[in-house]
Amino acid sequence: MNSGIDLQGSFIEALKELGLPSGVARAVWLPLPMLLMIIGATVGVLVVVWLERKISAAAQQRIGPEYAGPLGVLQPVADGIKLVFKEDVVTAKADRWLFTMGPVLVVVPVFLSYLIVPFGQNIVITDLNVGIFLWIALSSIAPIGLLMAGYASNNKYSLLGGLRAAAQSISYEIPLALSVLAIAMMSNSLSTVDIVQQQSGYGILGWNVWRQPVGFIIFWIAALAECERLPFDLPEAEEEIVAGYQTEYAGMKFALFYLGSYVNLVLSALVFAVLYLGGWEFIVPLDHVAEWLNMTGWVEVSTTTPWLQVITAALGITMTLLKAYFLVFLAILLRWTVPRVRIDQLLNLGWKFLLPVSLANLLITAALKLAFPVAFGG
Amino acid sequence: MFKILKQVQEYAKESVQAAKYIGQGLSVTFDHMRRRPITVQYPYEKLIPSERYRGRIHYEFDKCISCEVCVRVCPINLPVVDWEFDKKAKKKKLKHYSIDFGVCIFCGNCVEYCPTNCLSMTEEYELASYDRHELNYDNVALGRLPYKVTQDPMVTPLRELAYLPKGVMDPHDLPADSKRAGKRPEEILEETSSE
Protein backbone atom coordinates (compact mmCIF):
# COMPACT_ATOMS: atom_id res chain seq x y z
CA MET A 1 0.00 0.00 0.00
CA ASN A 2 1.21 3.47 -0.82
CA SER A 3 1.92 5.72 2.10
CA GLY A 4 0.10 8.70 0.60
CA ILE A 5 1.21 12.30 0.82
CA ASP A 6 4.66 12.89 2.36
CA LEU A 7 4.96 16.52 3.36
CA GLN A 8 8.22 16.17 5.27
CA GLY A 9 10.03 14.40 2.43
CA SER A 10 8.84 16.83 -0.22
CA PHE A 11 9.64 19.89 1.92
CA ILE A 12 13.19 18.72 2.66
CA GLU A 13 13.74 17.77 -0.99
CA ALA A 14 12.56 21.22 -2.08
CA LEU A 15 14.96 22.93 0.33
CA LYS A 16 17.84 20.73 -0.83
CA GLU A 17 17.17 21.73 -4.41
CA LEU A 18 17.50 25.35 -3.31
CA GLY A 19 21.04 24.49 -2.22
CA LEU A 20 20.66 23.97 1.52
CA PRO A 21 22.53 21.10 3.16
CA SER A 22 20.22 18.30 4.32
CA GLY A 23 20.89 18.96 8.02
CA VAL A 24 19.79 22.58 7.72
CA ALA A 25 16.74 21.53 5.67
CA ARG A 26 15.74 19.15 8.43
CA ALA A 27 16.23 21.83 11.09
CA VAL A 28 14.03 24.21 9.12
CA TRP A 29 11.31 21.55 8.87
CA LEU A 30 11.47 20.58 12.55
CA PRO A 31 9.58 23.44 14.24
CA LEU A 32 6.89 23.66 11.56
CA PRO A 33 4.68 20.68 12.51
CA MET A 34 5.04 21.48 16.22
CA LEU A 35 3.93 25.06 15.71
CA LEU A 36 1.10 23.89 13.49
CA MET A 37 -0.02 21.41 16.13
CA ILE A 38 0.00 23.98 18.96
CA ILE A 39 -1.98 26.43 16.84
CA GLY A 40 -4.30 23.65 15.71
CA ALA A 41 -4.92 22.49 19.28
CA THR A 42 -5.63 26.05 20.46
CA VAL A 43 -8.02 26.74 17.60
CA GLY A 44 -9.63 23.38 18.31
CA VAL A 45 -10.21 24.53 21.89
CA LEU A 46 -11.81 27.77 20.72
CA VAL A 47 -14.14 25.77 18.52
CA VAL A 48 -15.00 23.37 21.33
CA VAL A 49 -15.67 26.16 23.82
CA TRP A 50 -18.00 27.80 21.31
CA LEU A 51 -19.70 24.48 20.56
CA GLU A 52 -20.08 23.71 24.24
CA ARG A 53 -21.79 27.02 24.90
CA LYS A 54 -24.01 26.84 21.82
CA ILE A 55 -25.04 23.20 22.30
CA SER A 56 -25.64 23.73 26.01
CA ALA A 57 -27.81 26.71 25.12
CA ALA A 58 -29.75 24.67 22.57
CA ALA A 59 -30.29 21.83 25.03
CA GLN A 60 -31.74 24.33 27.49
CA GLN A 61 -33.79 26.25 24.91
CA ARG A 62 -31.55 29.30 25.14
CA ILE A 63 -29.72 31.18 22.40
CA GLY A 64 -26.20 31.28 23.81
CA PRO A 65 -23.43 33.69 22.78
CA GLU A 66 -24.64 35.82 19.91
CA TYR A 67 -23.11 39.27 19.79
CA ALA A 68 -19.34 38.55 19.62
CA GLY A 69 -18.85 37.86 15.93
CA PRO A 70 -21.33 36.00 13.71
CA LEU A 71 -23.31 33.59 15.92
CA GLY A 72 -20.94 34.43 18.76
CA VAL A 73 -17.96 32.53 17.34
CA LEU A 74 -15.56 35.11 18.76
CA GLN A 75 -16.86 34.65 22.32
CA PRO A 76 -14.09 32.21 23.36
CA VAL A 77 -11.49 34.65 21.95
CA ALA A 78 -13.06 37.44 23.99
CA ASP A 79 -12.99 35.22 27.09
CA GLY A 80 -9.33 34.44 26.49
CA ILE A 81 -8.35 38.08 26.00
CA LYS A 82 -10.21 39.03 29.15
CA LEU A 83 -8.35 36.37 31.15
CA VAL A 84 -4.97 37.50 29.76
CA PHE A 85 -5.54 41.05 30.95
CA LYS A 86 -6.68 40.09 34.44
CA GLU A 87 -4.49 40.54 37.50
CA ASP A 88 -2.33 37.58 38.43
CA VAL A 89 -3.31 36.96 42.04
CA VAL A 90 -1.33 34.66 44.31
CA THR A 91 -2.88 34.17 47.73
CA ALA A 92 -0.88 35.37 50.73
CA LYS A 93 0.14 32.05 52.26
CA ALA A 94 0.22 29.99 49.07
CA ASP A 95 3.41 28.26 48.01
CA ARG A 96 4.37 30.55 45.18
CA TRP A 97 6.45 28.10 43.17
CA LEU A 98 4.15 25.10 43.34
CA PHE A 99 1.19 27.39 42.75
CA THR A 100 2.71 28.48 39.45
CA MET A 101 4.01 25.05 38.50
CA GLY A 102 0.60 23.38 38.92
CA PRO A 103 -1.16 24.71 35.80
CA VAL A 104 2.01 24.28 33.73
CA LEU A 105 2.26 20.64 34.73
CA VAL A 106 -1.36 20.13 33.76
CA VAL A 107 -1.16 21.81 30.36
CA VAL A 108 2.22 20.75 28.98
CA PRO A 109 1.64 16.95 28.93
CA VAL A 110 -1.68 17.43 27.21
CA PHE A 111 -0.13 19.45 24.41
CA LEU A 112 2.76 16.99 24.26
CA SER A 113 0.30 14.15 23.69
CA TYR A 114 -0.71 15.72 20.37
CA LEU A 115 2.59 14.32 19.05
CA ILE A 116 1.04 10.94 18.46
CA VAL A 117 -2.34 11.92 16.99
CA PRO A 118 -2.36 10.90 13.32
CA PHE A 119 -4.49 12.67 10.72
CA GLY A 120 -3.23 10.56 7.85
CA GLN A 121 -0.57 8.09 6.88
CA ASN A 122 2.19 10.70 7.07
CA ILE A 123 0.24 13.53 8.66
CA VAL A 124 1.48 12.91 12.17
CA ILE A 125 4.29 14.63 14.04
CA THR A 126 6.05 11.46 15.16
CA ASP A 127 5.01 7.90 14.48
CA LEU A 128 6.40 6.53 17.74
CA ASN A 129 6.29 2.76 18.12
CA VAL A 130 5.03 3.28 21.70
CA GLY A 131 2.58 6.00 20.62
CA ILE A 132 -0.55 5.15 22.56
CA PHE A 133 1.52 4.16 25.59
CA LEU A 134 3.09 7.62 25.55
CA TRP A 135 -0.39 9.12 25.71
CA ILE A 136 -1.33 7.02 28.74
CA ALA A 137 1.97 7.84 30.46
CA LEU A 138 1.61 11.58 29.81
CA SER A 139 -1.99 11.67 30.93
CA SER A 140 -0.95 10.41 34.37
CA ILE A 141 1.30 13.44 34.90
CA ALA A 142 -1.71 15.77 34.96
CA PRO A 143 -3.07 14.58 38.37
CA ILE A 144 0.29 15.49 39.94
CA GLY A 145 -0.16 19.02 38.66
CA LEU A 146 -3.73 19.09 39.94
CA LEU A 147 -2.69 17.86 43.37
CA MET A 148 0.16 20.37 43.38
CA ALA A 149 -2.20 23.21 42.52
CA GLY A 150 -4.71 22.10 45.14
CA TYR A 151 -2.15 21.70 47.91
CA ALA A 152 -0.19 24.87 47.14
CA SER A 153 -3.30 27.07 47.18
CA ASN A 154 -3.49 26.71 50.96
CA ASN A 155 -7.27 26.44 50.82
CA LYS A 156 -9.37 23.52 52.01
CA TYR A 157 -11.61 23.46 48.93
CA SER A 158 -8.60 23.48 46.65
CA LEU A 159 -7.01 20.65 48.60
CA LEU A 160 -10.20 18.59 48.50
CA GLY A 161 -10.51 19.21 44.78
CA GLY A 162 -6.91 18.25 44.19
CA LEU A 163 -7.29 15.04 46.20
CA ARG A 164 -10.47 14.14 44.36
CA ALA A 165 -8.80 14.77 41.01
CA ALA A 166 -5.90 12.54 41.95
CA ALA A 167 -8.14 9.73 43.25
CA GLN A 168 -10.33 9.91 40.16
CA SER A 169 -7.49 9.96 37.67
CA ILE A 170 -5.71 7.04 39.32
CA SER A 171 -8.78 4.81 39.52
CA TYR A 172 -9.86 5.46 35.93
CA GLU A 173 -6.39 5.15 34.44
CA ILE A 174 -6.44 1.38 34.89
CA PRO A 175 -9.63 0.49 32.95
CA LEU A 176 -8.55 3.01 30.33
CA ALA A 177 -5.16 1.34 29.95
CA LEU A 178 -6.72 -2.14 29.90
CA SER A 179 -9.17 -1.28 27.15
CA VAL A 180 -6.34 0.32 25.16
CA LEU A 181 -4.34 -2.84 25.75
CA ALA A 182 -7.05 -4.95 24.10
CA ILE A 183 -6.81 -2.72 21.03
CA ALA A 184 -3.02 -2.88 21.05
CA MET A 185 -3.21 -6.66 21.23
CA MET A 186 -5.50 -6.81 18.20
CA SER A 187 -3.31 -4.44 16.23
CA ASN A 188 -0.02 -6.05 17.30
CA SER A 189 1.33 -2.56 17.81
CA LEU A 190 1.22 0.43 20.11
CA SER A 191 1.75 2.89 17.27
CA THR A 192 -1.32 4.95 16.49
CA VAL A 193 -0.65 4.77 12.75
CA ASP A 194 -0.52 0.96 12.87
CA ILE A 195 -3.73 0.85 14.90
CA VAL A 196 -5.53 2.80 12.17
CA GLN A 197 -3.90 0.71 9.44
CA GLN A 198 -5.25 -2.44 11.04
CA GLN A 199 -8.79 -1.00 10.88
CA SER A 200 -8.55 -0.02 7.21
CA GLY A 201 -9.66 -1.89 4.14
CA TYR A 202 -13.31 -2.54 4.89
CA GLY A 203 -14.58 0.99 5.40
CA ILE A 204 -16.94 1.46 8.32
CA LEU A 205 -17.21 -2.31 8.85
CA GLY A 206 -13.53 -2.63 9.71
CA TRP A 207 -13.55 -0.14 12.59
CA ASN A 208 -12.73 -1.38 16.04
CA VAL A 209 -16.14 -0.44 17.43
CA TRP A 210 -17.60 -3.66 16.05
CA ARG A 211 -14.83 -5.85 17.44
CA GLN A 212 -14.53 -4.06 20.78
CA PRO A 213 -18.02 -2.86 21.77
CA VAL A 214 -17.35 -3.33 25.48
CA GLY A 215 -13.94 -1.69 25.33
CA PHE A 216 -15.54 1.17 23.41
CA ILE A 217 -17.96 1.96 26.24
CA ILE A 218 -15.36 1.49 28.98
CA PHE A 219 -12.91 3.74 27.18
CA TRP A 220 -15.55 6.42 26.76
CA ILE A 221 -16.52 6.38 30.44
CA ALA A 222 -12.90 6.39 31.54
CA ALA A 223 -12.02 9.16 29.09
CA LEU A 224 -14.87 11.31 30.43
CA ALA A 225 -13.55 10.72 33.95
CA GLU A 226 -10.01 11.60 32.87
CA CYS A 227 -11.23 14.87 31.33
CA GLU A 228 -13.37 15.61 34.40
CA ARG A 229 -16.44 15.98 32.21
CA LEU A 230 -19.81 16.20 33.79
CA PRO A 231 -20.93 12.90 35.20
CA PHE A 232 -17.45 12.80 36.75
CA ASP A 233 -16.69 16.45 37.44
CA LEU A 234 -16.33 16.06 41.21
CA PRO A 235 -12.88 17.69 41.41
CA GLU A 236 -14.47 21.00 40.44
CA ALA A 237 -18.03 20.42 41.66
CA GLU A 238 -19.10 23.99 42.29
CA GLU A 239 -21.99 23.15 44.58
CA GLU A 240 -19.75 21.30 47.00
CA ILE A 241 -16.22 22.67 46.85
CA VAL A 242 -16.51 26.03 45.02
CA ALA A 243 -14.24 25.29 42.04
CA GLY A 244 -12.00 22.56 43.42
CA TYR A 245 -8.31 23.04 42.75
CA GLN A 246 -9.06 26.12 40.60
CA THR A 247 -10.60 28.07 43.47
CA GLU A 248 -7.62 30.36 44.12
CA TYR A 249 -6.60 30.78 40.49
CA ALA A 250 -7.24 33.87 38.41
CA GLY A 251 -6.15 35.38 35.14
CA MET A 252 -3.60 33.55 33.02
CA LYS A 253 -3.12 30.63 35.41
CA PHE A 254 -6.84 29.93 35.46
CA ALA A 255 -6.85 30.26 31.68
CA LEU A 256 -4.18 27.56 31.53
CA PHE A 257 -6.37 25.17 33.53
CA TYR A 258 -9.35 26.04 31.36
CA LEU A 259 -7.35 25.57 28.17
CA GLY A 260 -5.87 22.34 29.50
CA SER A 261 -9.23 20.80 30.27
CA TYR A 262 -10.61 21.55 26.82
CA VAL A 263 -7.44 20.49 24.99
CA ASN A 264 -7.65 17.28 26.97
CA LEU A 265 -11.24 16.78 25.88
CA VAL A 266 -10.36 17.26 22.22
CA LEU A 267 -7.33 15.02 22.61
CA SER A 268 -9.37 12.25 24.20
CA ALA A 269 -11.94 12.50 21.42
CA LEU A 270 -9.16 12.33 18.81
CA VAL A 271 -7.52 9.31 20.45
CA PHE A 272 -10.92 7.71 20.78
CA ALA A 273 -11.55 8.26 17.08
CA VAL A 274 -8.16 6.77 16.28
CA LEU A 275 -8.60 3.73 18.49
CA TYR A 276 -12.22 2.81 17.82
CA LEU A 277 -13.57 4.78 14.86
CA GLY A 278 -10.88 4.10 12.30
CA GLY A 279 -8.97 7.40 12.57
CA TRP A 280 -8.68 9.02 9.18
CA GLU A 281 -10.47 6.21 7.34
CA PHE A 282 -13.47 7.17 5.23
CA ILE A 283 -16.79 5.29 5.50
CA VAL A 284 -15.97 3.40 2.29
CA PRO A 285 -12.38 2.31 1.59
CA LEU A 286 -10.80 4.87 -0.75
CA ASP A 287 -8.45 2.39 -2.41
CA HIS A 288 -11.42 0.47 -3.72
CA VAL A 289 -13.01 3.66 -5.01
CA ALA A 290 -9.81 4.49 -6.91
CA GLU A 291 -9.68 0.99 -8.33
CA TRP A 292 -13.32 1.19 -9.35
CA LEU A 293 -12.65 4.52 -11.08
CA ASN A 294 -9.84 2.84 -13.01
CA MET A 295 -12.08 -0.04 -13.96
CA THR A 296 -14.82 2.18 -15.36
CA GLY A 297 -12.13 4.03 -17.28
CA TRP A 298 -13.35 7.55 -16.58
CA VAL A 299 -10.12 8.76 -15.14
CA GLU A 300 -6.67 7.28 -14.96
CA VAL A 301 -5.69 7.13 -11.28
CA SER A 302 -3.24 5.23 -9.19
CA THR A 303 -2.36 5.65 -5.53
CA THR A 304 0.55 7.87 -6.51
CA THR A 305 -1.51 10.40 -8.46
CA PRO A 306 -0.84 13.77 -6.78
CA TRP A 307 -4.42 15.07 -6.82
CA LEU A 308 -5.71 11.83 -5.36
CA GLN A 309 -3.11 12.07 -2.61
CA VAL A 310 -4.17 15.62 -1.77
CA ILE A 311 -7.84 14.59 -1.71
CA THR A 312 -7.06 11.59 0.48
CA ALA A 313 -5.07 13.73 2.92
CA ALA A 314 -7.77 16.41 3.13
CA LEU A 315 -10.45 13.77 3.54
CA GLY A 316 -8.39 12.07 6.24
CA ILE A 317 -8.02 15.27 8.29
CA THR A 318 -11.71 16.05 7.84
CA MET A 319 -12.79 12.56 8.85
CA THR A 320 -10.60 12.53 11.98
CA LEU A 321 -11.91 15.93 13.04
CA LEU A 322 -15.51 14.99 12.23
CA LYS A 323 -15.32 11.85 14.34
CA ALA A 324 -13.62 13.72 17.18
CA TYR A 325 -16.17 16.52 17.16
CA PHE A 326 -19.01 14.02 17.06
CA LEU A 327 -17.62 12.57 20.28
CA VAL A 328 -17.25 16.04 21.77
CA PHE A 329 -20.89 16.66 20.90
CA LEU A 330 -21.83 13.45 22.66
CA ALA A 331 -19.87 14.55 25.74
CA ILE A 332 -21.68 17.88 25.83
CA LEU A 333 -25.05 16.17 25.42
CA LEU A 334 -24.16 13.80 28.24
CA ARG A 335 -23.26 16.79 30.38
CA TRP A 336 -26.87 17.99 30.34
CA THR A 337 -28.36 14.52 30.67
CA VAL A 338 -26.54 12.74 33.46
CA PRO A 339 -26.36 13.99 37.05
CA ARG A 340 -23.01 14.09 38.84
CA VAL A 341 -22.01 10.89 40.64
CA ARG A 342 -20.99 10.89 44.30
CA ILE A 343 -17.37 10.15 45.21
CA ASP A 344 -18.26 6.66 46.53
CA GLN A 345 -20.30 5.90 43.40
CA LEU A 346 -17.38 7.11 41.32
CA LEU A 347 -14.89 4.79 42.99
CA ASN A 348 -17.41 1.93 43.01
CA LEU A 349 -17.95 2.30 39.29
CA GLY A 350 -14.23 2.51 38.64
CA TRP A 351 -12.97 -0.37 40.77
CA LYS A 352 -15.94 -2.72 41.00
CA PHE A 353 -17.46 -2.38 37.53
CA LEU A 354 -15.07 -0.98 34.94
CA LEU A 355 -11.95 -2.78 36.16
CA PRO A 356 -13.36 -6.36 36.16
CA VAL A 357 -15.30 -5.77 32.96
CA SER A 358 -12.24 -4.40 31.17
CA LEU A 359 -10.15 -7.32 32.45
CA ALA A 360 -12.76 -9.77 31.16
CA ASN A 361 -12.83 -7.85 27.89
CA LEU A 362 -9.06 -8.18 27.61
CA LEU A 363 -9.18 -11.94 28.27
CA ILE A 364 -12.01 -12.49 25.79
CA THR A 365 -10.15 -10.48 23.18
CA ALA A 366 -7.08 -12.64 23.74
CA ALA A 367 -9.17 -15.81 23.41
CA LEU A 368 -10.86 -14.55 20.24
CA LYS A 369 -7.51 -13.59 18.81
CA LEU A 370 -6.29 -17.17 19.29
CA ALA A 371 -9.55 -18.66 17.99
CA PHE A 372 -10.21 -16.37 14.98
CA PRO A 373 -6.86 -14.83 13.99
CA VAL A 374 -8.35 -13.57 10.72
CA ALA A 375 -10.90 -11.22 12.26
CA PHE A 376 -9.00 -10.29 15.42
CA GLY A 377 -5.52 -9.61 14.07
CA GLY A 378 -3.53 -12.85 14.35
CA MET B 1 -22.36 -21.83 42.56
CA PHE B 2 -25.80 -21.05 41.11
CA LYS B 3 -26.17 -18.20 43.54
CA ILE B 4 -23.15 -16.48 42.08
CA LEU B 5 -24.46 -16.99 38.56
CA LYS B 6 -27.75 -15.48 39.57
CA GLN B 7 -25.99 -12.50 41.12
CA VAL B 8 -23.99 -11.96 37.96
CA GLN B 9 -27.17 -12.18 35.91
CA GLU B 10 -28.90 -9.60 38.05
CA TYR B 11 -25.91 -7.31 37.95
CA ALA B 12 -25.81 -7.53 34.17
CA LYS B 13 -29.52 -6.85 34.00
CA GLU B 14 -29.15 -3.76 36.16
CA SER B 15 -26.28 -2.47 34.05
CA VAL B 16 -28.31 -2.88 30.87
CA GLN B 17 -31.22 -1.10 32.50
CA ALA B 18 -28.99 1.78 33.62
CA ALA B 19 -27.67 2.08 30.08
CA LYS B 20 -31.24 2.12 28.77
CA TYR B 21 -32.22 4.93 31.12
CA ILE B 22 -29.18 6.99 30.14
CA GLY B 23 -30.15 6.45 26.51
CA GLN B 24 -33.66 7.67 27.22
CA GLY B 25 -32.27 10.74 28.98
CA LEU B 26 -29.99 11.46 26.03
CA SER B 27 -32.91 11.30 23.63
CA VAL B 28 -34.81 13.83 25.76
CA THR B 29 -31.86 16.22 25.77
CA PHE B 30 -31.39 15.70 22.05
CA ASP B 31 -35.04 16.45 21.40
CA HIS B 32 -34.76 19.73 23.30
CA MET B 33 -32.11 20.94 20.86
CA ARG B 34 -34.58 21.30 18.02
CA ARG B 35 -37.00 23.34 20.13
CA ARG B 36 -37.19 27.07 19.71
CA PRO B 37 -35.32 29.14 22.31
CA ILE B 38 -37.55 30.92 24.79
CA THR B 39 -34.99 33.65 25.44
CA VAL B 40 -36.12 37.25 25.85
CA GLN B 41 -33.05 39.28 24.92
CA TYR B 42 -33.54 41.67 27.76
CA PRO B 43 -32.32 45.18 27.06
CA TYR B 44 -33.54 44.91 23.45
CA GLU B 45 -36.68 42.87 24.08
CA LYS B 46 -38.88 43.09 27.15
CA LEU B 47 -41.97 41.26 28.29
CA ILE B 48 -45.08 43.35 28.74
CA PRO B 49 -45.96 43.08 32.44
CA SER B 50 -49.46 41.81 33.14
CA GLU B 51 -52.12 44.30 34.23
CA ARG B 52 -51.97 43.09 37.84
CA TYR B 53 -48.19 43.48 38.00
CA ARG B 54 -47.05 45.03 41.28
CA GLY B 55 -44.20 47.34 40.35
CA ARG B 56 -43.08 50.71 41.64
CA ILE B 57 -45.85 52.59 43.48
CA HIS B 58 -47.27 55.75 41.91
CA TYR B 59 -48.52 58.48 44.23
CA GLU B 60 -50.66 61.55 43.64
CA PHE B 61 -49.80 64.25 46.12
CA ASP B 62 -52.92 66.34 45.59
CA LYS B 63 -55.32 63.48 46.28
CA CYS B 64 -53.74 62.50 49.59
CA ILE B 65 -55.61 63.36 52.78
CA SER B 66 -52.76 62.32 55.13
CA CYS B 67 -54.92 59.69 56.81
CA GLU B 68 -51.91 57.37 57.31
CA VAL B 69 -53.90 54.25 56.47
CA CYS B 70 -51.07 53.24 54.16
CA VAL B 71 -48.67 53.34 57.12
CA ARG B 72 -50.95 51.21 59.28
CA VAL B 73 -51.56 48.49 56.69
CA CYS B 74 -47.91 48.35 55.70
CA PRO B 75 -46.19 45.30 57.21
CA ILE B 76 -43.26 47.47 58.30
CA ASN B 77 -44.92 50.90 58.51
CA LEU B 78 -42.82 52.09 55.64
CA PRO B 79 -44.50 55.16 54.06
CA VAL B 80 -43.37 58.39 55.70
CA VAL B 81 -46.23 60.89 55.89
CA ASP B 82 -45.03 64.30 57.02
CA TRP B 83 -48.03 66.56 57.80
CA GLU B 84 -48.91 69.46 60.05
CA PHE B 85 -52.31 70.42 61.41
CA ASP B 86 -53.42 73.67 59.82
CA LYS B 87 -55.43 75.33 62.58
CA LYS B 88 -56.97 77.97 60.32
CA ALA B 89 -58.41 75.53 57.82
CA LYS B 90 -58.88 72.84 60.47
CA LYS B 91 -57.29 70.34 58.11
CA LYS B 92 -54.12 68.30 57.93
CA LYS B 93 -51.59 69.95 55.64
CA LEU B 94 -49.35 67.42 53.90
CA LYS B 95 -45.73 68.51 53.56
CA HIS B 96 -43.84 65.45 52.34
CA TYR B 97 -44.54 61.83 51.50
CA SER B 98 -41.94 59.16 50.75
CA ILE B 99 -41.56 55.41 50.32
CA ASP B 100 -38.19 53.67 50.42
CA PHE B 101 -38.22 51.04 47.67
CA GLY B 102 -35.07 49.50 49.04
CA VAL B 103 -37.20 48.24 51.94
CA CYS B 104 -40.66 47.94 50.31
CA ILE B 105 -41.77 44.39 49.54
CA PHE B 106 -44.33 45.46 46.93
CA CYS B 107 -47.18 43.70 48.70
CA GLY B 108 -49.66 46.36 47.57
CA ASN B 109 -51.52 46.68 50.88
CA CYS B 110 -51.20 50.49 50.86
CA VAL B 111 -52.67 50.62 47.36
CA GLU B 112 -55.47 48.31 48.42
CA TYR B 113 -56.54 50.38 51.43
CA CYS B 114 -55.92 53.95 50.26
CA PRO B 115 -59.34 55.66 50.68
CA THR B 116 -58.74 58.27 47.98
CA ASN B 117 -56.94 56.02 45.48
CA CYS B 118 -53.93 58.29 45.49
CA LEU B 119 -51.63 55.24 45.53
CA SER B 120 -51.43 52.84 42.60
CA MET B 121 -49.19 50.09 41.32
CA THR B 122 -47.25 50.66 38.09
CA GLU B 123 -45.55 48.19 35.77
CA GLU B 124 -42.13 49.72 36.33
CA TYR B 125 -39.55 47.28 37.70
CA GLU B 126 -36.15 48.66 36.71
CA LEU B 127 -35.30 50.52 39.91
CA ALA B 128 -31.58 49.72 40.12
CA SER B 129 -29.30 52.49 41.33
CA TYR B 130 -25.73 52.86 42.52
CA ASP B 131 -26.69 54.15 45.94
CA ARG B 132 -29.36 52.64 48.15
CA HIS B 133 -30.47 56.09 49.31
CA GLU B 134 -31.57 56.83 45.78
CA LEU B 135 -34.26 54.19 46.24
CA ASN B 136 -35.96 56.37 48.83
CA TYR B 137 -38.53 58.05 46.57
CA ASP B 138 -40.05 61.34 47.70
CA ASN B 139 -43.44 62.61 46.57
CA VAL B 140 -41.96 64.08 43.37
CA ALA B 141 -40.29 60.83 42.35
CA LEU B 142 -43.39 58.87 43.33
CA GLY B 143 -45.53 61.17 41.22
CA ARG B 144 -43.61 60.50 38.00
CA LEU B 145 -45.56 58.53 35.44
CA PRO B 146 -44.21 55.04 34.78
CA TYR B 147 -42.42 54.52 31.52
CA LYS B 148 -44.05 51.91 29.30
CA VAL B 149 -42.31 49.05 27.55
CA THR B 150 -44.64 49.39 24.59
CA GLN B 151 -43.75 53.05 24.06
CA ASP B 152 -39.97 52.68 24.14
CA PRO B 153 -38.57 52.88 20.59
CA MET B 154 -35.43 50.96 21.66
CA VAL B 155 -37.38 47.99 22.94
CA THR B 156 -39.30 45.23 21.20
CA PRO B 157 -42.21 44.50 23.53
CA LEU B 158 -43.10 40.82 23.81
CA ARG B 159 -46.27 39.34 25.17
CA GLU B 160 -46.16 36.95 28.09
CA LEU B 161 -47.16 33.33 27.55
CA ALA B 162 -50.70 33.77 28.89
CA TYR B 163 -51.33 36.65 26.47
CA LEU B 164 -50.53 34.71 23.31
CA PRO B 165 -53.20 33.36 20.93
CA LYS B 166 -54.25 29.76 21.43
CA GLY B 167 -51.57 27.28 20.40
CA VAL B 168 -48.90 29.93 19.83
CA MET B 169 -45.76 29.62 21.94
CA ASP B 170 -43.49 32.21 20.36
CA PRO B 171 -44.15 35.90 21.07
CA HIS B 172 -41.98 37.09 18.15
CA ASP B 173 -43.60 38.51 14.99
CA LEU B 174 -47.19 38.22 16.13
CA PRO B 175 -49.81 40.00 13.98
CA ALA B 176 -50.81 43.19 15.77
CA ASP B 177 -54.49 42.31 16.11
CA SER B 178 -54.01 38.75 17.38
CA LYS B 179 -56.14 38.06 20.43
CA ARG B 180 -55.09 36.08 23.44
CA ALA B 181 -56.63 32.73 24.25
CA GLY B 182 -59.89 32.79 26.20
CA LYS B 183 -62.29 35.69 26.73
CA ARG B 184 -61.31 39.18 27.70
CA PRO B 185 -62.93 40.66 30.86
CA GLU B 186 -65.13 43.04 28.88
CA GLU B 187 -66.46 40.14 26.81
CA ILE B 188 -67.40 38.21 29.93
CA LEU B 189 -69.07 41.33 31.30
CA GLU B 190 -71.05 41.78 28.07
CA GLU B 191 -72.24 38.19 28.15
CA THR B 192 -73.38 38.31 31.75
CA SER B 193 -75.22 41.62 31.31
CA SER B 194 -77.03 40.43 28.16
CA GLU B 195 -78.35 37.34 29.90
Image (cartoon, coloured by chain):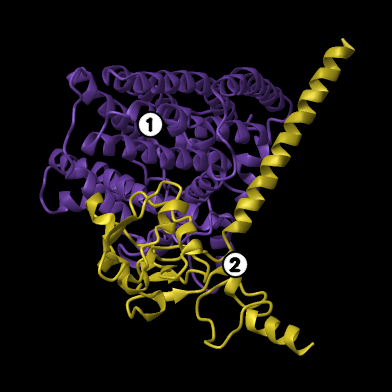
Chain colours: A purple, B yellow
The residue identified by callout 1 is A243
The residues tagged by marks 2 and 1 sit, at their Cα atoms, a distance apart of 62 Å
Report the residue at 66% width, 77% height from top.
Answer: B181
Image coordinates of residue B121 in percent, x first then y, are: 44, 66
> Which-is-in-front pick, marks 2 and 1?
1
Graded by Cα atoms within 10 Å as few (under 14), some (14 to 19) or many (20 or more), the crowding at tag 1 reads some
Image coordinates of residue A317 in percent, x first then y, are: 42, 53
Residue A125 is tagged as: none
Q: Is residue A153 above or below residue A41?
A: above
Callout 1 secondary element: loop
Q: Is residue B27 above or below residue A190?
A: below
Q: Who is closer to the viewer here, A264 or B163?
A: B163
Q: Who is closer to the viewer here, B113 or B179?
A: B113
Which of pointers 2 and 1 lies earlier in the amino acid sequence? 1
Report the residue at 51% width, 39% height from top.
Answer: A272
User: Quadrant of residue A64 in the image?
Assistant: bottom left
Image coordinates of residue B23 in percent, x first then y, are: 68, 44
Callout 2 secondary element: helix
Q: Is residue B186 above or below residue A168?
A: below
Q: Amino acid at mark 2?
A: Met
The residue identified by callout 2 is A295
